[in-house]
Amino acid sequence: MKLTKKRVAALGLLSFSFLFCLIVRILFDDILNAIIDAELKQKLPIKEGTMAYKYWIKPPVPIAFKIYVFDIVNPEEILSGTSVPIVNEKGPYVYRMHLKKTNIKFHKENYTVEYRQPEKFVYDRAASVGSENDTFTTINIPFMTVANVLKNEFRWMQIITDAFFRSMNESTFMTRSVHDIWWGYKDPVLQLGADILKTFNISISILNGKFGFYMDRNNTDDGLFNVFSGQNHNFSNYVMIDTWNRMKHQSAWKSDLANRIKGSGDGSMQPPRITKDAELSVFDTNLKRTLKLVYNRTSSYKGVDALRFLIPYSEFFNAKDNPDNAGYCTPDVEHCLPSGAINMSDLYYSAPVCASLPHFLGGDPYYQRQVKGLKPSQDKHQPFYDYHALTGVALTGSRRYQLVLKTRPYKNFESFKNMVNAYIPILWIDGLAQLDEETSHMFKTQIQDLLDAMVYVKVVLIVLTCVAGLAFVLLIVYWNRKDKKKVSSEHITERSPLLKNGSIQSYSEGNGVVSNGTYDQIERPSTDHI
């Protein structure tokens, strides 16, 4: 193949294009990651002026705090022993929870930031099935707690206490409003009962004149958090808890592992660049424990890709089924509950209260046999978080758990003499958080769309590389064939007539004269002499 200036220029351009596209494609991921790392270092650190700080100090995630209560429909049959408890779920009763971090203090020595996060609850009647003053029937929790605390005291003391409560019209069951059972209600009987027990040097924290699972908690916070800020550009422990209420370990449980305080403070953020194999966790201040998260599937929220992580059923298993949970067995591992519930009595005023997933989802069938009316569903009842893989922000998520009362007969309490051995659910909560429209749009246009475009850029680079390489080869083949054809034509010209300007040249050997004309015009040599 003859190389002319034009051919050299064309091949050089194609070679450059091929190598450029190939090198850029090979280095594309590294280049993209370098750009992303630079952006993360600029925008993620929790400090004044960064994008993360803006959303961290006041999360753009409206939280719908939903309460579902279990109405006991057959109290008389329970006490007569003719039926197991039958419950009817009522809800949701929805509160809008508003968050804003306060008392912010940065610690430069270890790149952490300290804060409190007050929670303000406002009832949302439009999103609820009824008024927060709707009532339901459940076990008389304060009364049963007193019976449980005194079960090992003198018989006469139990009889007197029971008689006192019954004289004040306290009975086995009570009918209370959703508001009362959650936010608390004043009850002079509870205060009077406490005064009586004090004469016997017995103190029961539940007897303080008021009872409620979340009483006095509106407009308060869950404690003093100190988390890693990422100001040193180390995002491996970003927004993870360093201390809670100045502690790295609490004393609520029976093992160091169970008492360890770690994970995300509220689950709304995790370290960036989450993968399916990431080991994530959240610290739940209501359950006073860390909960692991496991990858479930890919998902999306308002057009933004996410990875869904679940709190697995195994987090509520007993020590036999999950040895890591041995510390949650109280008072020891010999008293573990069947898998599916954790004893919370030490955290709830000595009340025989347990925590589980709603409707005992994932728990031992033992619980389902004790109560009728439960319908566990993974979609409705399993806690989950949809995390944006690149930034670690939760696009949506739901913290769910159920409060259960362990009931049993108390022979010296007339009101509970015929009580069933059962785990009766009282209520469950669903704290559903979803990124607002403005922030979702920002994630879609400024992050997701760009990441999607990068996929097409990669494809284009691959196509251009192939096109440039193929064009290079085809041109060489084409020019090589063209040159061979030209050489062949020139060789034939030397030995036979050549086509020139549409005519035939012939050479007369006899006289050396060349004549022009068509084939029909050429005078053939005479053969008469042959």
Image: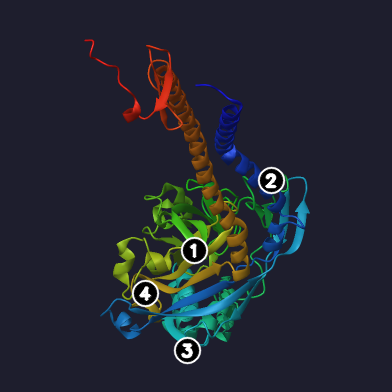
* Picture coordinates of residue 476, whole percent (x, y): 48, 27
Q: Looking at the image, tell me whether mark 4 or mark 1 is earlier in sequence order.
A: 1
Using the rendered view, name the quadrant where residue 286 is placed: bottom right
**Badge 3 or badge 4: first in the primary sequence:** 3
Which SS class for mark 1? loop
Instruction: State the image quarter where residue 290 is shown.
Output: bottom right
Which residue is at the front of the view, 481 or 27? Answer: 481
Marked residue nearer the N-terminal end (2 or 1): 2
Of tags 2 and 3, the one toward the viewer is 2
334 sits left or right of 267 in the view = left
Q: CA distance from mark 2 to mark 3?
A: 72 Å
Name the amino acid, label 3: Ser
The residue mark sitting in front, 2 or 1, is: 2
Task: Identify the secondary structure beneath mark 3.
Answer: helix
Crowding at dot 2, Cα within 10 Å, few <14 / some 14-19 / many 20+, comes out as few
Counting residues from the N terminus, which is met first, the one under dot 4 or under dot 2? 2
